[in-house]
Image (cartoon, helix red, strand yellow):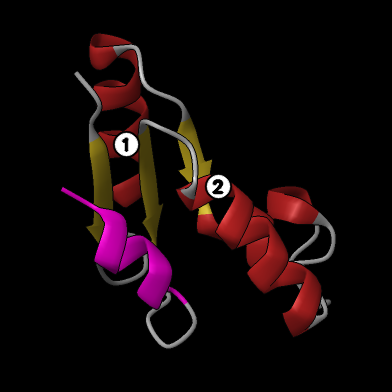
Amino acid sequence: MASRIHIFGGPASGKTTLARKLAGELGLPHVELDALFWAGGTAGYGVRRDPVERDRRLSGAVKAESWIMEGVYWSWCQPSFERAD
């Protein structure tokens, strides 16, 4: 059975920790929205990815059958909210 979970919350609220734990227990891929937003991924905060490229990556991620996605972002994440269970 497919599962698509979007975890949304403020900075340092435990989103990533929860997503990693659930991903491991449920065997689902974990998508960190920071890795889509920042050009250097989660290791390179400071330079924003081009919005067209960011949205392309998000579109590819949400098309997967199952995932756990997490982040603090809202305005550009509508596709994930719409597809989440």
Instruction: Give the residue at x 43% y 76%.
Output: 73
What amino acid type should be assigned to the residue bearing mark 1?
Ala
Q: Position of residue 51 (x, y in %)?
A: 73, 82
- Residue range highlighted in magenta: 77-85
Q: Nearer the viewer, mark 1 or mark 2?
A: 2
Tell me the residue that label 2 is attached to: 61
Q: Is residue 24 left or right of residue 30?
A: left
SS at circle 2: helix
Q: How far apart in space, not on screen, are marks 1 and 2 (Cα)? A: 15 Å
Instruction: Tell me the quarter of the picture where residue 4 sits.
Output: top left
Mark 1 surroundings: few (<14), some (14-19) or many (≥20) residues within 10 A: many
Identify the mark at residue 7; answer none if there is no mark. Answer: none
Task: State which tag comes first along the sequence, 1 or 2.
Answer: 1
SS at circle 1: helix
Residue 54 visible to an observer of this rendering: yes
Q: Is residue 66 above or below residue 78?
A: above
Q: Main secondary structure of the magenta part?
A: helix
Tell me the residue that label 1 is attached to: 19
What amino acid type should be assigned to the residue bearing mark 2?
Ala
Instruction: Tell me the quarter of the picture where residue 17 sits.
Output: top left
Q: Position of residue 58 (x, y in %)?
A: 58, 60
Q: Position of residue 64 (x, y in %)?
A: 48, 37
